[in-house]
């Protein structure tokens, strides 16, 4: 695993969930799905396959198992007897290459657990800001990607541009 994300911590940092008075029925499920979609659509494919998001849940949402895949992303729901932080700590301990692991959470308990294994810990707000910057830069055209017409201009196009720039015909 390369990236381990504290799901609800990141959800609150993202403001996807919104204020309590605007959530309504099914709001948590919609917000969780929106967060997973944002992550899945923003990470490069090779990183996505090595990413896990962990949520607290007394039970997994109806029809979902405690561990499932969402667009290449592994999603966990903590068991009834545990919480997301405990599951994340367990996953950090189980990781075979913790120096290559990044833990995304603003929870200092998880930062300490990551540091003990020499993994990298990043606050949710910082990680999300970087994710959005990286996503934007991947979707923006690069300066060298100019849009050039293919092939020679037609006689009509040549005439149009000559008129525009006052050239001789």
Image: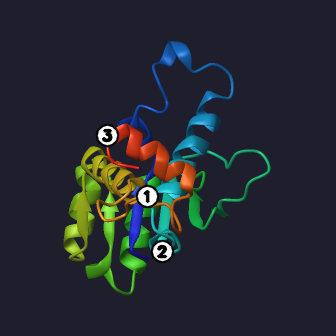
> Mark 1 and mark 3: span between their CA atoms?
24 Å
Residue found at x 43% / y 71%: 91
**Left or right of residue 76, residue 111 in this image:** left
Q: Is the image coloured rainbow, by chain, by secondary structure, or in one colour? A: rainbow
Q: CA distance from mark 3 to mark 2?
A: 59 Å
Mark 2 nearby-residue class (10 Å; few <14, some 14–19, many ≥20): some
Q: Position of residue 79 (x, y in %)?
A: 59, 56
134 relative position to 76: left or right: left
Q: Earlier in the sequence, mark 1 or mark 2?
A: 2
Label 1 packing within 10 angstroms: few (<14), some (14-19), many (20+): few
Where residue 61 sits in the image (x, y, percent)?
A: 70, 45
Residue 160 at x, y = what percent?
A: 47, 43
Q: Which residue does the image show at 37% across and 76% down from the upper left? A: 93
SS type, badge 1: loop
Residue 166 shows which numbered tag? Answer: 3
Looking at the image, which residue is at 45% across and 19% down?
19
97 vs 81, left or right, is: left
Numbered label tally: 3
Q: Nearer the viewer, residue 42 or 55?
A: 42
Frontmost residue, 37 versus 24: 37
Q: Which residue is mark 2?
A: 50
Q: Where does residue 149 sit, x and y in percent of width and height?
A: 49, 60
- For mark 3, give the secondary structure: loop
Sequence order check, earlier mark of 1 and 3: 1
Residue 9 appears in the rendering = no
Q: Which residue has dot 1 on it?
A: 147
Q: Give how far apart the Cα atoms at labels 1 and 2 are.
A: 36 Å
Element under label 2?
Answer: loop
């Amino acid at each position: 695993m390369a990236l381990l994300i504290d799901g609800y911590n990141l959800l609150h940092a993202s403001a996807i969930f919104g204020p309590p008075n605007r959530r309504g029925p099914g709001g948590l499920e919609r917000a969780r799905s929106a967060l997973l979609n944002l992550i899945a659509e923003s990470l490069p494919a090779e990183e996505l396959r090595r990413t896990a998001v962990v949520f607290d849940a007394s039970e997994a949402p109806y029809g979902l198992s405690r561990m499932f895949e969402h667009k290449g992303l592994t999603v966990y729901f903590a068991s009834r007897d545990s919480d997301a932080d405990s599951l994340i700590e367990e996953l950090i301990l189980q990781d075979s290459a913790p120096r290559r692991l990044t833990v995304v959470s603003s929870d200092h308990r998880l930062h300490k657990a990551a540091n003990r294994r020499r993994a990298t810990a990043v606050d949710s707000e910082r990680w999300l800001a970087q994710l959005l910057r990286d996503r934007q830069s991947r979707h923006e055209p690069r300066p060298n990607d100019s849009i050039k017409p293919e092939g020679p201009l037609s006689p009509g196009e040549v005439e149009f541009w000559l008129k525009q720039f006052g050239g001789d015909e």
